[in-house]
Image (spheres, rainbow, N blue to C red):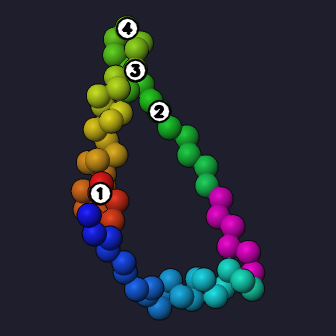
Amino acid sequence: MGTSIDRLTSLDRLMLGASTRSPQDIGALAILDGTSLLDPAGALRIDVVRMHPRASADPYARLRP
C-alpha cells in the first residue's frame, strides 16, 4: 500500500510560519439538533450516523479511507 505525500502550498507554509510568531487559536460553537438520528422509540439510528461522514467526505479525496 503506497502513501501519497503532497507538498505544502504557499498558504500552508504561511500558516506554519505564523504559528511560531503568534497563537493560531480557533474557537467554535455548534448547537445541533439530533432528533433526526432517533427512531420513534427514541433509540439511536446508528446506520444513519455511520452513513453521513462517508457521504460528506466524497468530494474530498484526502478524507476518504
How much space separates mark 2 and mark 1, taking CA atoms?
Answer: 26 Å
Question: Pointer 4: what residue?
Answer: 41
Circle nearer the viewer, 1 or 4: 1
Please give left or right for residue 14 compared with residue 37 in the image: right
Where does the magenta region start and end?
Answer: 22-27
Q: Amino acid at mark 2?
A: Asp
Sequence-first tag of 1 and 4: 4
Rendered image: mark on residue 64: 1
Secondary structure, mark 4, is loop
Discs 3, 1 touching: Cβ within 8 Å: no
Estimate the x, y position of residue 7 in percent, counting from the top left: 40, 86
How much space separates mark 4 and mark 2, taking CA atoms?
Answer: 17 Å
Estimate the x, y position of residue 41 in percent, counting from the top left: 37, 8
Circle nearer the viewer, 2 or 1: 1
Question: Pointer 3: what residue?
Answer: 44
Question: Pointer 2: what residue?
Answer: 33
Secondary structure, mark 1, is loop
How much space separates mark 3 and mark 2, taking CA atoms?
Answer: 13 Å
Sequence-first tag of 2 and 1: 2
Residue, far bottom: 10
Circle nearer the viewer, 3 or 4: 3
